[in-house]
Image (spheres, rainbow, N blue to C red):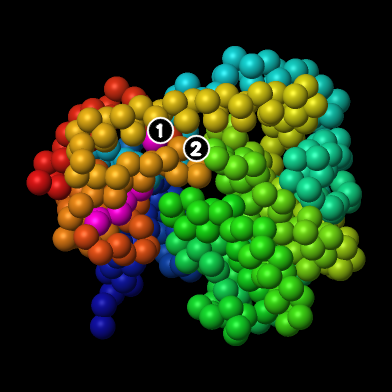
Amino acid sequence: MQTKYLQVYDYYKKLILSGKLPENTKMPSIRKCSEQLSLSRTTIEAAYLCLAADGYIISRPQSGYFVTPRPVKSSTKNAQLQENIHKDKKDILYNFTSNNVDADSFDFNLWRRYIKSALRQDKRLLSYGEPQGEYELRETICNYVINKRNAVCRPENIIIGAGSQSLLNILCPLLKERKGVCFHDTKFAQGMVIFEDYGFQLVSNQEEADILYMTPSHMTSLGDVMSVENRLSLLKEAISHNRLIIEDDYNNEFRYFSKPRPCLQGLAGGEHVVYLSTFSKLLLPSIRLSFMILPDELLPMYEKKKALYNQTASKAEQLALCQFLRDGHLDSQIRKLKRLYAGKAKALCNELELTFGNRAKISMGESVSMVHLKLKSNMSNTEFRNRLQKKGILVFASPKETKGYAHIALSCCELPIEDFSKAVILMKSVAD
């Protein structure tokens, strides 16, 4: 049987090798460790001396013992994973699937002025934010969605949060009587995991679900939009089967050939639909301000619990956004983004037409930032996408196959115009 000091030695050795005691972590003092483990100081000191002799810890005068920097065996897998992640990022040359925004899309100086103005409201910043979100921001958002999205709501229906995940964490407990949820966009893993964590069953068939998570303004990766007729049909079917619809309207403003279509929430008269949207796409991804509109039927349950929730969105950013919206800057920002992305999309179309000529059909998508390329080829859409990915070009593959053509789509949001030519030339080398 091991002596006690060797048991202590093995205990700390395992913690160090597993990474649970990272390098430079201060070890408990001999006195404190003796008290914690109910062993004599002599036993602890002997164990520490052995650990120091084998290089696991080091003694620093007047400071105590610290874990020494050393390779940790059990972290090899994690280190390899991180290395692969960095390698994958490094191998991406041109990303036509990015959700990030163009560097010229936002007026940082303007936003900085509103943030500074908010930070001057000393008394308001001394208190925690309202759990539901600052009332004047909810009031301003209410006016905006009524006028721009045909929504039906009051400020009391609106909840502010830092991103859709934080809002879904509030919503899920209100829906505990429902069991199955169907996500139209199965790539929204961040939302699906929230429902799984709350015990909901993820189903692929709408008929088996009593919650439908829909993105009517962005039905596919290519930016297809649900027609008004299909929206009305979906609502009629959902109401007849007592299904709740969660409408994620994150991309509705970015239409090019058509005006934004009325949201499901408005078409339903504010009932049977939970509406989600965000300002991150219109402003900056780092400005994590989203909102949710609860139907009146869910409000009583939320009212009972809301005092227990902390507000996740910055109070200063809420105050800044409120005045930003009141001053009409969001409308001008949307117009600016449409001009910017439409111009980039046209430039990308020109590059594709010059490079591929009659071999391809080039068109702009309904989303202002999306360009479609239909290349005469025996490759499938997925095969073409995968070949491009091996060369460091990320694109969307159309879910619908067309005989004799490989159909992909490219988002020009993040990539600078000056990179289009090089990217398209590399794309052609893959197609040849």
- Report how far apart the C-alphas of labels 2 and 1 lie in the structure: 7 Å
The residue tagged 2 is 368
User: Percent position (x, y) of residue 139?
Assistant: 86, 39
Residue 177, percent across and down?
Answer: 74, 81
Mainly helix, strand or loop, the magenta region?
strand
Where does label 1 land, which residue? Answer: 345
Residue at point 68%, 29% (across, down): 330
**Image point (38%, 42%), residue name:** 363
What is the magenta range?
405-412
Q: Is residue 98 visible?
A: yes
Q: Which numbered tag is attached to residue 178?
A: none
Could you say whether the residue bearing mark 1 is in a helix, strand or loop? helix
Label 2 sits on a secondary structure element that is loop
In the foreground, 88 or 70? 88
**In terms of image quadrants, where is residue 196?**
bottom right
* Badge count: 2
Inspect the image, locate mark 1, and give the three-letter code of the amino acid beneath it: Ala
Q: Residue at x 57, y 19 (%)?
A: 107
Q: Report the front residue among 402 and 424.
A: 402
Q: Residues within 10 Å of mark 1 (few under 14, many from 20)?
A: many
